[in-house]
Each structure stands twice: as C-alpha cells, then as structure tokens.
Image (cartoon, rainbow, N blue to C red):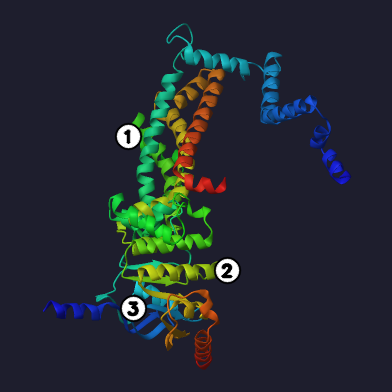
C-alpha cells in the first residue's frame, strides 16, 4: 500500500492525484488543456516575436510584413471590393483559389485516371511491366520544373500547360505506389478467387484493386502534395491567374503581405486536400482501421 | 439406353490421377511428384500423408489446376483438369479469406461472382455457417477471428460452391493442438452432412487415420505414393476411436511403411 502511494506521488501526475476534492479535478482539467495547447506554444512565440520585431523597426516592414499586416492583407484580398482604390488584389482571393483549385483537380484527376489503372497493370502483368516500367523509371528523375519549356511549347501560355505539369508530377507517385500495391498482393488470394471461378476482370476488380488500395492511397496523398507544388510553379510561369501567379506578381511589386498570405493559403489548401483524401481513405479502408483501433 | 449412360457417368465420377509427374525446371530439374496413380471414387475421403517437402501440396495444386502436370493426367469427374474451377473447391493452409470482406461476404463470394441474386445463396450460406458454428459472426471481419474460425469460414466458403470435390491443403496445420482436434471433429460432422469427395493433405498420422476412408502415404524426393491403407473405422466417428485397437494397428502400419521408405 505504501509502495503504491509512493509510486502515485512520484511524478507530476502523482502530485495531482495526491490532492483531494474539487481542487484536484480542476488541476487535472488545466493539465489537460495545457497539453492540448502545447503544439500552439512555439508558433505563438514566433508570431509574437515576429510582430514585435517588425513593430519595433528591428526588421523593416518593407522587407517582411508583420503577422497583423499579413492578416489585414489577407482580409482585403478575400473580402475587399474588387478594383477599388490602390489595391490591385482586392477581393480576388476566392477567384484565385478557384483558378488554382480547378487546375489541381483536373491535373490530379488525369494523374489518377492514368496512374492507378496503369500502375495496377504494370504491377500485376509481367508483359506490361517489361514494356512500361523501364520507361517510367527513366522519365521519373526528370523534375517537372524541367518540363516547363516543353509544356509551354506544346500547350502555350494557359491552363493546359499548368494542368499537364500537375498531371505529370502527380502521376509518378501514384503510378509507382499502384505498381507496388499490385505487385505485393498475396498470390494465394488470387488462387482463392480463381478456384471460385473468377474471370481475369473479376480478379482485377475484386482482388487486386482492394488488395492494392492501401498502397494506392499512399500514392494519392503523395500525388496531391506534388500537385500543389506543380500548380504554384506552373502559374508563376505559364498562366496569368491563380495563387502561384499572384505569389510571383506580388513579389515583383513588393507586396510582401500578399506573398506571405498567399503562402499561408496554399499551405492551408494542401492541408485540407490531404485531410479530404485521408477521410476518403478511412471510409474505403474501414476493414484496415477496424483492426488498428 | 439411358441406363448405360448412368453407368458410364458413375464410372467417371471420381478423381483419377494417371502417371502424374511434376518436374520443376531449371538447370537441375527436380521431380516434386513422380508417377502418381490414384483413383478416388465419389463420396470418399482420402488423406494424403507425407513429410514436409514430399510434394503433397504440389499434388493438390495439380488437382486444383493451380499448376499443370509435366507428364500424366488429372481427370476429375470425367473432365481433364486444365485450370482452377469452382467444381474443385480448395481449403487452403492459411484460410486465405479476403480481409476486406466480412464473413458472410467471404462465404458467398463465389455466388456473387456469378451475379446470383441474394435469395439464391443466402439460405445455403446460413445453413453452412450454422454447420461450422459461425452463426452470429456473419458481419465479423477476418482479422477479428481466430485461426480456427477463419478455417471454418474457409470450409463454409468451399461448400457454398457446391463443388464435386473438396481439396484441403493441411488446413489445420497452423492451429494449436486443441483447436486442431476440435476442427477435425467439426470437419467430420460437416462431412457426414454433405458427403463430398475429399482429398485432404496432412503430415499428421493421427489426423489422417481419424478423418479418412483411405490413407495414401507419400515418400519424399521424388514424391511417390508408397502405401495405400484402407481405414475400416466405422462412421460417424468421434474422438474416442483414437483409443481403439484398429486405430493403433493402422498407426503401426503407417509407421512401418514410413520406416521402410526412409533413406
């Protein structure tokens, strides 16, 4: 008994438990809130320090906007009246989000349509693997940035150029992971389906696809990350609208609060699209989650 | 004349292996099984008994159609075997259930492949799940089941196909001793109900005698059938037969046969 008490009062948690009555419950609650807020501590210190550094003049505001300045800039970018006063960006944020979002969605969809079926075929069929896999592996080290002149030559300045780069960039992680998913499937499951009379098509749709889905989703999440990278680069060069275009344009005319606000928006969109894919994955792969719970 | 036809088809209703040989290629070809002759009539339960590496699983894969013979022929109920097919159901060593499907969907997979409406297979599925003692587990996922329960799903899945023969590849080999005994009894109870032709691969002498009508003993490298033993134990059998004199006599015969063919 004494040993137990000693053990309980040993750590900070023990100190809390040693208190009795209403007070202890309060302490526990505060401790819990503290743990919840812990991830925000370092960002808060940075933001406050940053704000103070700019306000005190230690960092010139022309070089780096303060967090409050960025917030104000974002506010007018989002909700200001378009074409009013001196602010060229006023009220255009939502339209730019839609521009970039649409390109990402189209390029990404194209990458999925080519990458998933292609990867599954390469992973499962040796003939496809021999004909296509070396080509993909040889092309993959060429960064999508290096493709920029080619895509501009082929598609000109415009959305098609950006979409082709996004599709190409997202295609590689999707196809590579789909290949692995199909290659690593349990061949005994294919035998089980064969002995139950499955046709090749049914083997693909009812055995290989579900087996490969966990790997495919890894590729989809990586691909979405590449897609947002690609849209920013493509819009800086190949299109005259969207978040990437604004980013570069604002930099040129010295609007650092828009540059930094733009970065925050791109980061948020990337985060949200990853959460969306994760939510879909949880639903589709419920049989996996049940186990790890 | 229809009478003659009946006789003909009855003669053909068996597993018929003739001079069956499987050689794995390469620079040094190895015969996994060699010159196997085996005739197993409809409704009979055969155990193929042998040490690991003797080619007994290869033999089963040849009958299942997962592998093709180098020489000789495999004929099941009059049809030469060229590929896997639903008339030859397999119960695997690991149950090989689809982990993304629940128990009911695993058991009814073969019917759903054919696009059969649910009312066609549901009664049989429920009957088979009851027969293997899994009523109430329909919505469980394979990962939530024990090894023994997964094999029971595998047995129900195989029987739902209404196969001509049931091929079982050491289905209880990975189970603990106690569960294995339970599963052997359960298999016999289910078999009494459906009386399928069974080819059961095992390395367990007691299991072979307890389950089968006839035990084929195999030797290794190359895999050959060295002994064929009839098991005259009455059916239905329960665990108590393992203490009978006949059972022990058969054990001794099998031990002697194995001893004779060991190098």
Residue A122 visible from this viewpoint: no
Q: Please indicate whether residue A138 sits to the left or right of residue A59 in the image.
A: left
What residue is pinned by disc 3? B69
Q: Please indicate whether residue A6 sits to the left or right of residue A173 in the image.
A: right
Q: Is residue A293 above or below residue A20?
A: below
SS category of the residue bearing label 3: loop
SS category of the residue bearing label 1: helix
Give the x, y percent position of residue B244.
53, 83
Q: Marks 1 and 2, Cα distance to the nearest angstrom?
A: 70 Å
Give the x, y percent position of residue B102.
44, 51
| Residue at screen point 46% across, 40% down | A283
Q: Is residue A258 above or below residue B16?
A: above
What residue is pinned by disc 2? B178
Chain holding disc 2: B
Q: Is residue A134 above or below residue B60?
A: above
What residue is pinned by disc 1? A155
Label 3 and label 2 in one chain:
yes
Structural crowding at the residue carrying mark 2, measured as other residues with C-alpha within 10 Å and reported as few (<14), some (14–19) or many (≥20): few
| Residue at screen point 41% across, 33% down | A104
Give the x, y percent position of residue A153.
34, 36
Q: Please indicate whether residue A44 sits to the left or right of residue A110 in the image.
A: right
What is the quadrant of residue B161 in the picture? bottom left
Q: Marks 3 and 1, Cα distance to the nearest angstrom?
A: 56 Å
| Residue at screen point 45% across, 9% down | A81
Label 1 and label 2 in one chain:
no
Chain holding disc 1: A
- Nearest the viewer among B48 and A155 is B48
Q: Is residue B72 above or below residue A28?
A: below
> Which quadrant: the C terminus of chain A?
top right
Label placed on residue A220: none
């Amino acid at each position: 008994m004494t040993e137990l008490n000693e053990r309980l009062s040993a750590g900070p948690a023990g100190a809390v438990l040693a208190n009795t009555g209403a007070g202890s419950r309060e302490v526990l609650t505060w401790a819990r809130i503290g743990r919840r807020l812990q991830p925000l501590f370092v960002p808060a210190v940075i933001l406050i320090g940053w704000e103070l550094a700019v306000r005190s003049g230690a960092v010139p505001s022309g070089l780096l906007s303060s967090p409050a300045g960025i917030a104000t800039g974002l506010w007018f970018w989002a909700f200001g009246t378009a074409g009013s006063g001196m602010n060229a960006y006023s009220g255009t944020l939502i339209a730019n989000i839609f521009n970039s979002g649409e390109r990402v969605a189209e390029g990404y969809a194209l990458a999925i349509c080519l990458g998933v079926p292609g990867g599954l075929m390469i992973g499962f069929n040796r003939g496809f693997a021999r004909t296509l896999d070396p080509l993909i592996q040889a092309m993959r080290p060429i960064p999508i940035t290096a493709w920029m002149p080619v895509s501009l030559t082929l598609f000109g300045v415009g959305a098609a150029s950006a979409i082709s780069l996004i599709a190409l960039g997202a295609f590689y992680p999707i196809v590579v992971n789909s290949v692995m998913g199909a290659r690593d499937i349990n061949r005994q499951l294919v035998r089980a389906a064969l002995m139950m009379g499955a046709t090749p098509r049914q083997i693909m749709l009812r055995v290989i696809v579900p087996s490969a889905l966990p790997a495919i989703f890894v590729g989809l999440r990586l691909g979405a990350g590449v897609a947002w990278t690609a849209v920013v680069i493509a819009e800086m060069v190949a299109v005259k609208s969207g978040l990437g275009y604004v980013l570069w344009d604002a930099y040129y005319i010295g609007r650092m609060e828009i540059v930094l606000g733009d970065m925050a928006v791109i980061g948020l969109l990337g985060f949200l699209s990853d959460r969306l894919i994760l939510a879909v994955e949880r639903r589709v792969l419920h049989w996996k989650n049940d186990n790890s719970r | 004349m229809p009478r003659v036809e009946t006789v003909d088809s009855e003669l053909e209703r068996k597993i018929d292996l003739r001079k069956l040989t499987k050689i794995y290629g390469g620079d040094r070809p190895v015969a996994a099984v060699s010159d196997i002759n085996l005739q197993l009539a409809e409704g009979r339960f055969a155990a193929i008994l042998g040490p690991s590496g003797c080619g007994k699983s290869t033999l089963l894969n040849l009958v299942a159609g997962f592998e093709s013979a180098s020489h000789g022929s495999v004929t099941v109920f009059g049809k030469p075997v060229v590929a896997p097919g639903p008339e030859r159901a397999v119960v695997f060593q690991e149950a090989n259930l689809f982990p993304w499907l629940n128990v009911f969907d695993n058991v009814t997979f073969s019917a759903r492949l054919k696009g059969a409406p649910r009312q066609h297979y549901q009664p049989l599925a429920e009957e088979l799940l009851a027969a293997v003692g899994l009523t109430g587990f329909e919505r469980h996922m394979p990962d939530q089941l024990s090894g023994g329960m997964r094999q029971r799903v595998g047995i129900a899945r195989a029987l739902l196909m209404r196969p001509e023969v049931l091929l079982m590849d050491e289905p209880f080999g990975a189970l603990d001793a106690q569960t294995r005994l339970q599963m052997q009894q359960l298999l016999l109870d289910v078999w009494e109900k459906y009386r399928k032709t069974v080819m059961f691969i095992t390395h367990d002498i007691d299991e072979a005698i307890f389950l089968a009508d006839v035990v084929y003993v195999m030797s290794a490298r190359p895999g050959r059938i060295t002994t064929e033993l009839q098991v005259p134990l009455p059916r239905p059998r329960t665990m108590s037969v393992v203490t009978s004199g006949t059972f022990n006599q058969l054990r001794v015969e099998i031990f002697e046969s194995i001893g004779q063919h060991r190098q």
